Image (spheres, rainbow, N blue to C red):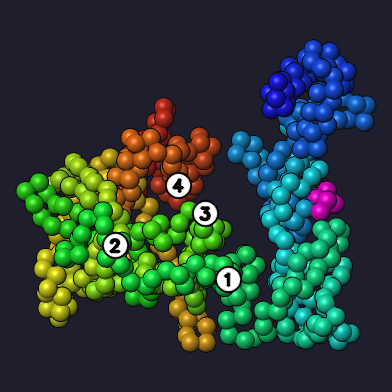
């Protein structure tokens, strides 16, 4: 019997004997298994916080001991909370938090009839370092942390002999000890607090977002050609002679998707092509490992921290106009009613005809004669694309898709990094058009993965819990809007009709 099977047997035995003696000898007798193996597994389970032993030697499972695992949130007043889906949040006073910091994953002991709990273990640290600024208090320099909630927890700040702190200097400090209070060590100087860009760099570093790439990653990047070779086109569908465009924001630097569309007797033939990054970022390579670590590109007010180095994201993996690029294409036959009757997914190569912006496409769709004349060589691409996307959206809406119409915020900065505009980012027909095309392609890819039984991650929107729905109904009524929910399971059309009304 392996350890995992024995762990499950021990937990099942404990929970089926809540009122019986549950010392080690009782468990061994109850299971009838070799006592040495049981002792070893129980010791391991206790170290992993799967079981708990009282002062009298009685064992309990997490559930029996009232142990809850969760992420602790600590407010400015020092009070901690563990949120639970099916019950009221557990509150944790400052003196019951042990060494837990905001965001840590912890085990908390709290019986069902209690409101306040106690941290018994920290399972995972959310923070390994802090950001702070050396300031002169009149009695010498001291470190003021960006996170005010941690300020009182500092005991000592260590640094190397050749380091000299200066007032106004902003630094990254590693947490050497999570004791009460904490001990920090200066690792990196970011700059001085009033220098342009230092504030944004501090935020990025606080969230483990590095601007620079490791040397081994850049070595791999420099070995990649910035032009497509003839041999690389083998086995790909050549779409270079088709009218294809990228449509992005005015300030976009990397173009990772492109669209083309043509009218036919069945509706529209829509093609969505994305940069074939996997051709250059091979599995297990330094580039792949770094991209996995970063997860995505990060957009802040004055810069973009890319998931891949600029040589790739803005270069050979960017669908720049008038140059050949390697792509993956999802080709869809869209019927007049917006449904997709057929699709194909294949490796391809394209030569983007134009780099378009949302603003210019919106103006073309609104009848701007000057722009229509400038892009006359694209023919009726944008009107066909708009008609196709509108049909896709109508079909999706008829199936119960919910449009919440939430707006994004936009921050514009001057050359010194000072924001001069904060407001909503306005979306027009062009933005919706591209969104509809991308959703249609994603649905095709999801279907392909499903029918080919290829392991994949799917984004699933579960049915909301009755508690959340009831909270929504009450909030809606307070705002003067009445929502009547069906007695059985709710369908998206109910929310859709409510929003439209």
Mark 2 or 1: in front is 2
Q: Upstream in the sequence, badge 4 or badge 1?
A: 1
Mark 4, secondary structure of its residue? helix
For the residue pair 381 and 420, the one nearer the viewer reads as 381
Q: CA distance from mark 4 to mark 1?
A: 54 Å
Mark 1, residue position:
215
| Residue 257 x %, y % | 32, 62
In contact (CB < 8 Å): disc 1 and disc 3: no
Q: CA distance from mark 2 to mark 1?
A: 29 Å
Mark 2, residue position:
231
Question: Is residue 156 shown to the viewer in this render?
Answer: yes
Number of other residues with Cα within 10 Å of mark 3, as a class: few under 14, some 14 to 19, many 20 or more: few
Mark 1, secondary structure of its residue? helix
Q: CA distance from mark 4 to mark 2?
A: 61 Å
Q: Upstream in the sequence, badge 2 or badge 1?
A: 1
Is 124 contained in the magenta span? no
Q: CA distance from mark 3 to mark 4?
A: 50 Å
Number of other residues with Cα within 10 Å of mark 4, as a class: few under 14, some 14 to 19, many 20 or more: few
Mark 3, secondary structure of its residue? loop
Compared across the picture, whether 95 is left or right of 274 comes to right
Compared across the picture, whether 7 is left or right of 466 comes to right
Vertical placement of residue 43 versus 436, above or below: above
Mark 4, residue position:
476
The residue range painted magenta reads 94-99
| Residue 391 x %, y % | 19, 50
Mark 3, residue position:
284
Compared across the picture, whether 430 is left or right of 384 comes to right
| Residue 495 x %, y % | 37, 42
Mark 4 or 1: in front is 1
Q: CA distance from mark 3 to mark 2?
A: 24 Å
């Amino acid at each position: 019997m392996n350890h995992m099977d024995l762990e499950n047997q021990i937990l099942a035995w404990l929970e089926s004997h809540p009122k019986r003696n549950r010392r080690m000898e009782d468990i061994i007798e109850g299971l009838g298994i070799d006592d040495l193996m049981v002792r070893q597994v129980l010791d391991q389970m206790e170290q992993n916080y799967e079981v708990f032993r009282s002062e009298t030697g009685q064992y309990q499972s997490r559930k029996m001991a009232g142990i809850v695992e969760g992420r602790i949130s600590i407010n400015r007043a020092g009070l901690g909370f563990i949120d639970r889906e099916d019950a009221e949040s557990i509150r944790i006073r400052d003196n019951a938090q042990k060494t837990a910091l905001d965001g840590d994953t912890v085990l908390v002991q709290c019986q069902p009839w209690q409101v306040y709990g106690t941290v018994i273990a920290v399972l995972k640290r959310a923070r390994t370092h802090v950001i702070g600024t050396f300031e002169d208090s009149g009695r010498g320099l001291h470190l003021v942390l960006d996170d005010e909630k941690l300020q009182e927890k500092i005991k000592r700040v260590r640094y190397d002999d050749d380091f000299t702190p200066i007032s106004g200097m902003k630094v990254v400090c590693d947490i050497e000890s999570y004791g009460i209070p904490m001990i920090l060590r200066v690792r990196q100087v970011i700059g001085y607090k009033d220098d342009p860009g230092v504030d944004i760099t501090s935020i990025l570093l606080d969230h483990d977002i590095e601007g620079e790439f490791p040397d081994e990653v850049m070595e791999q990047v420099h070995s990649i050609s910035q032009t497509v070779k003839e041999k690389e086109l083998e086995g790909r569908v050549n779409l270079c002679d088709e009218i294809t465009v990228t449509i992005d924001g005015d300030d976009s630097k990397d173009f990772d998707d492109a669209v083309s569309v043509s009218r036919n007797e069945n509706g529209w033939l829509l093609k969505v092509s994305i940069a074939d990054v996997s051709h250059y970022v091979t599995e297990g390579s330094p580039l792949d490992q770094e991209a996995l670590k970063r997860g995505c590109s990060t957009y802040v007010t004055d810069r973009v921290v890319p998931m891949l180095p600029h040589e790739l994201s803005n270069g050979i993996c960017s669908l720049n106009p008038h140059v050949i690029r390697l792509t993956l294409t999802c080709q869809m036959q869209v019927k007049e009613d917006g449904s997709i009757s057929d699709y194909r997914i294949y490796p391809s190569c394209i030569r983007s005809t134009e780099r378009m912006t949302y603003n210019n496409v919106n103006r073309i769709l609104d009848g701007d004669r000057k722009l229509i004349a400038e892009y006359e060589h694209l023919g009726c691409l944008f009107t066909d694309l708009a008609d196709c996307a509108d049909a896709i959206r109508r079909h999706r809406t008829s199936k119960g898709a919910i449009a919440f119409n939430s707006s994004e915020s936009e921050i514009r900065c001057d050359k010194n990094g000072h924001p001069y505009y904060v407001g909503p980012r306005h979306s027009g027909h062009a933005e919706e058009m591209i969104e509809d095309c991308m959703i249609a392609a994603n649905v095709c890819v999801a279907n392909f993965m499903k029918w080919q039984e290829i392991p994949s991650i799917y984004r699933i929107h579960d049915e909301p819990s009755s508690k959340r729905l009831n909270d929504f109904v009450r909030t809606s009524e307070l705002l003067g809007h009445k929502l009547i929910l069906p007695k059985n399971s709710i369908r998206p059309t109910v929310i859709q009709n409510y929003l439209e009304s």
